[in-house]
Amino acid sequence: MSLRHRRAGGVIATAVLLTGLVAAPASAAAPSTPVTRAALDPALTAGRGADVPFLEQEAERAVTSGTVIGPGRDAYTLPAEASGRSAVSLAPGQWVEFTLPRAANAITVRYSIPDAPGGGGITAPLGVTVNGRDARTMTLTSEYSWLYNQYPFTNDPGAELLHPDWWITECGCVPAETTPTPVISKPFRPSHFYDEQRLLLGRGYQAGDRVRLTASAAASWTVIDLLDSEMVGAPRVLLKAANVLAFGADPTGRRDAAPAIERAIRFARVARVPVYLPPGTYQVNRHIIVDDVTIEGAGNWYTIVKGRSVALETPAPDGSTHTGVGFYGQNSRHVRLAHFAIEGDVRERIDKDQVNGVGGAMSDSVIEGLHIRHTKVGLWFDGPMTRTRILGNIIVDQIADGLNFHIGVTDSVVSNNVVRNSGDDGLAMWSETAANARNTFDRNTVQTPVLANGIAIYGGTDNTVSRNLIADPIREGSALHAGSRFGALPFAGVLHFTDNTTVRAGTFELNWKVGLGALWIYALESSISSGISADGNHFLDSTYNAIMLVSDWPVKDLYSISNVRVTRTRVDGTGTSVLSARAAGSVYLSDVDARNVGAVGVNNCGSFGFTPAGSEFALTDGGGNDGGWLAAWMLPNTITCDDRPPVVAPPAPSPWG
């Protein structure tokens, strides 16, 4: 979460691409394409992240006639937003070829193509062949990507600053209060470059078959980030169900299917049977209200509920100015939504709009096997609600969060989900006005959140974040975050971060001009003292430090961070320190092993009082902290403050000996 946050493309988009142009053409790559998880050797992430049906392969490790871009981590560039911080750029006619690692009949391609010169996006075909034949075409689009400027962003690359009264790092000034007025280059802060498309190949192919993607002349360049391949099973069939076709639903997507789906829901509630959505595309341009009902599709590759954004003549009572496809609860119970896709039409961020894939409040409910894209937030729950499970969903290409538990969500589980290319926090709990309590985010994979954090917890009581894999946050956030921010109630009980793996995490905070930690604990609106346990986590290839504890400068003498325990932790590569303390408080450290550390092991600034007694932040050595990063002379509170040391890129992570 952040508070600030038609034809071939032209010079604007190309300049952004070239910012990350580093490597030479990769046509000499090995003929087989390695399988990765978050661009890592899967052995490094065993037991962490979602168990998924597809295998990931990175384009920069495939055979190509194009050019590898990256690696690079500077925000507002194509490499930074790519999985693994690298991708392949194709000119018209160039190709990238992947060798299938196992049998597959379906692929997902993550890509970027230019924006239209005036914004709004373009479309372009992408040629797909297998073993040089069976030609098919994917239609790529940039209509849902390319945001610019300051929060809440715009689709106009030529727009003036949205908030000239805000301080910006580009000029180190408040433009509206500066004479002469600074010249700010346009487009200002382009981002959100990537999108995904899925394609059923029409038949099965074997391991070793070669999938080639060829760029067309409809786009001046095409960037391919990765390919996921899988064997999709036959459509699911429910015979004892309220089949929406029997109630008049159009499976071609040409006519509005919402009334027919609602008739099926009313029948199903009386007959005590599920609602069945057979294979097809169903047009829905508003909310479907669900309560005490099961709605199942034939599988999220086969059943698509798709809608367009609709402007409201007058704002809704909740402030929405648009509506769109979504399944919403109204203090509902016993809802099950399963095995279909939700495809929205959200192209701009309007925070008041309720244009989320799933929303409202649903207790004692299950959401599973959905594929959600192009909505504002994949799943946004406004409690109170309890005992809901979110299982095995794929949430991609969102304008804002992937999932957010907002206000009084309790005893609920989010597990085995994939979130990729969210426009804000991938997964979040936000305890605004009522505490989220005893919830668990477990074994999810979160990749490339364009803004903010992979997983963020804002206040709450006794929540757990465990066994997740979080990779490549881009800006103004990190992989794991705990913050007293955004009006959240203070933390209570113990917040557990347990057995998570982060990779290439820790972004550059533009306002502070300081790099953030892969785990970032932030006291902005109150002290954090009830207890944070960080146990068994692996921090791999952190851009800056592995762990940061900070209070904002205006409140550094008001709020502190204490009762933090970091145990059984592995740190493999940091650009700067293992731990950075920019707050008063304390931490207990035990069995924290670190290697390939780029700067002093502990950057201890405390609250910047620099008194003869030492830092206002104290460290307790519980033993077993190996790797030489925590020396006796640093204890308990030696000032070692160097906030902006040179960043030393570590070697790639490797198995721990």
Image (cartoon, rainbow, N blue to C red):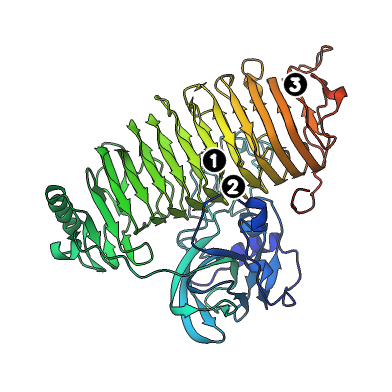
What amino acid does circle 2 point to? Answer: Ile
The tag on residue 620 is 3
Disc 2 crowd, CA 10 A, few/some/many (<14, 14-19, 20+): many
- What is the secondary structure assignment of the residue under circle 2? strand
| Residue drawn at 54 percent across, 60 percent down | 194
- What is the secondary structure assignment of the residue under circle 1? strand
Drawn side of residue 304 relative to residue 397, left or right: left
**Residue 76 higher or lower than 583, as above or below:** below
Q: Earlier in the sequence, mark 3 or mark 2?
A: 2
| Residue drawn at 26 percent across, 53 percent down | 295
Q: Is residue 597 visible?
A: no
On the image, numbered disc 2 is attached to which residue?
A: 470
Q: In this view of the protein, which residue sits in the foreground, 233 or 140?
A: 233
Label 3 – label 1 distance at C-alpha: 27 Å
Label 1 – label 2 distance at C-alpha: 8 Å
The tag on residue 455 is 1
Drawn side of residue 111 relative to residue 638, left or right: left
